[in-house]
Image: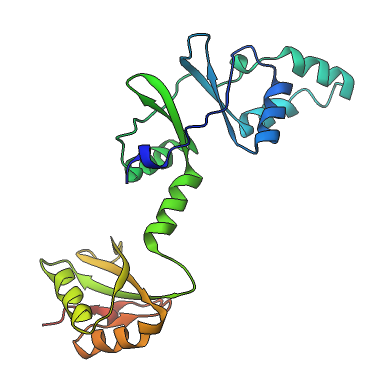
Amino acid sequence: MYVGRVMHTELVTVAPDTSLMKAREILEQRKIAHLLVVNARGDLVGIVSDRDLKQNWASPAVALSKHELNYLLNKVTVDQIMVKKILTVSPLTTIERAALIMEQNRISALPVLDEGRLAGIITSRDVMQVLLEAIGIDDDSRRLTVILEDRIGFLADMSRLLRDAEINIRSLFAWPDKNSPGYYHLVMRVNAADGDKALAVLEENGYKVLTAYTKDIAPFLSRPE
């Protein structure tokens, strides 16, 4: 999946001279968490988050009255608080790469530039939605986990067993076990009605299947012959 398939293209932008009062009003009305700041040519020059606004909103509140505070916030503009060193991605960036960039830099949104022009924005919420869809989590599925030693062909072997049993794999993903080098958690979802059958097929063929949280996974480290 690529950013271009997920990004929001109906963008909410503001000019650098937009007041903080106006910026907050736009965020609240549009129910969004970020504003893209563009100049008169349409170039991206900054980004402002609701967190940025809250941090700058509170600073003068102790000494000023409400009237004085509102007057001041109408004078302060977004270019005074916006993030100017902007991390961006292109529509060709993969979702997982975008997620890594956000996680490494502790940010929750990335503007998307297509050949230098602002084309969209992707947020951590969008990434989470893609993940949930990829996992296939819903009430009509059953989750099964096998912890396997990394070797060529293990995925093909398991898929063949389930195929021969006429069980459809709805989703499949894997990640390495941090405490057991060389082993992966292979997590699959099948139709809920096929859950018990899939469990039986795998166990009959030597796989040790996790169906719930287990503190000690050592007994489940398996490599069927």
Coloring applied to the structure? rainbow
Q: Residue furthest top?
A: 40
The location of residue 192, given as percent across then percent down, is 41, 80
Relative to 119, 76 lies left or right: right
Q: Is residue 80 above or below residue 53?
A: above
The location of residue 128, given as percent across then percent down, is 46, 51
Who's the residue at 24% across and 84% down the image? 202
Q: Is residue 175 above or below residue 67?
A: below
> What is the tally of numbered marks visible in this picture?
0
The location of residue 122, given as percent across then percent down, is 45, 37
Judging depth in this view, the residue of 182 and 143 nearest the camera is: 143
Quadrant housing residue 68: top right
Relative to 34, 177 lies left or right: left
Whether residue 107 can be seen here: no
Q: Quadrant of the C terminus?
A: bottom left
Q: Is residue 119 above or below residue 132?
A: above
Quadrant housing residue 176: bottom left
The location of residue 57, given as percent across then percent down, is 73, 27
Who's the residue at 22% across and 91% down the image? 204
Who's the residue at 35% across and 44% down the image? 95
Judging depth in this view, the residue of 54 and 45 nearest the camera is: 45
Relative to 45, 97 lies left or right: left
Whether residue 167 can be seen here: yes
